[in-house]
Image (cartoon, rainbow, N blue to C red):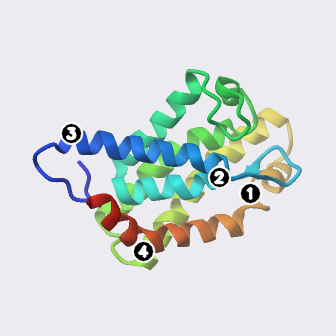
């Protein structure tokens, strides 16, 4: 059940499906804002969209929006950052893609239960980023055959400050977006 954005009792299922689809689309759009820093992992706004999905839709529906996004990739739609479709699941960024699901769930779970203030939502976002990095860096190390230091250098170091800012932006946007989506 959506806990962050209240549902009207009539049409609750339709509202949930629509909100999940909306955030799936937002994640797709977030892949298009990308910058390559020369390594195997690009900078995108996907982390921001995933954090917002968890914060606004809650654990279950936030994770479902990411699963829906991954489903689009699995059926070979070029909606990943490299626009390669299902091949993305064999590439160096696959761990990040998969890590988006537990990150959205974790952030949603934290916000549903206790993160009602902006700083608490930011901390929930930081925990979500840690989940993404844990899975993403592990996969990056395995796929590239590099060391942990190299995985950190390629897949976390250039992005950490920006991702912390994304978590702050997500926390700041929660109330504004919740009012907009609730209409």
Q: Which residue is mark 4?
A: 120
Q: Are marks 1 and 3 in contact (CB under 8 Å)?
A: no
Q: Give left or right: position of 157 versus 20.
A: right
Label 4 packing within 10 angstroms: few (<14), some (14-19), many (20+): some
Q: Residue at x 55, y 65 (%)?
A: 126
Q: Which residue is mark 3?
A: 13
Q: Are marks 4 and 1 in contact (CB under 8 Å)?
A: no
N-terminal-most mark, 1 or 3: 3
Looking at the rendered image, the disc whose residue lies closer to the viewer, 1 or 3, is: 3
N-terminal-most mark, 3 or 2: 3
Q: Residue at x 21, y 59 (%)?
A: 6
Q: Give left or right: position of 140 versus 31.
A: right
Q: Residue at x 52, y 62 (%)?
A: 127
Measured Cα–Cα span from mark 4 to mark 1: 23 Å
Measured Cα–Cα span from mark 3 to mark 2: 33 Å
Q: Which residue is mark 2?
A: 133
The spot of residue 85 in percent (x, y) is 66, 27
Measured Cα–Cα span from mark 3 to mark 4: 29 Å
Measured Cα–Cα span from mark 2 to mark 1: 7 Å
Name the one closer to the observer, 179 or 136: 179
N-terminal-most mark, 4 or 2: 4
């Amino acid at each position: 059940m959506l806990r962050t954005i209240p549902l009207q009792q009539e049409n609750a299922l339709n509202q949930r499906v629509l909100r999940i689809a909306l955030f799936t689309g937002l994640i797709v759009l977030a892949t298009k804002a990308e910058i390559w820093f020369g390594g195997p992992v690009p900078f995108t706004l996907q982390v921001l969209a995933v954090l917002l999905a968890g914060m606004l839709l809650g654990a279950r529906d936030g994770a479902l929006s990411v699963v829906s996004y991954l489903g689009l990739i699995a059926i070979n739609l070029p909606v990943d950052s490299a626009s390669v479709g299902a091949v993305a699941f064999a590439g160096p960024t696959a761990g990040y893609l998969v890590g988006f699901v537990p990150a959205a769930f974790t952030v949603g779970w934290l916000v549903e239960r206790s993160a009602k203030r902006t700083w608490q939502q930011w901390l929930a976002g930081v925990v979500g980023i840690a989940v993404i990095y844990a899975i993403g860096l592990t996969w990056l190390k395995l796929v590239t055959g590099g060391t942990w230091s190299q995985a950190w250098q390629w897949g976390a170091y250039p992005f950490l400050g920006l991702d912390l800012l994304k978590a702050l932006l997500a926390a700041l946007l929660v109330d504004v977006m919740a009012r907009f989506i609730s209409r």
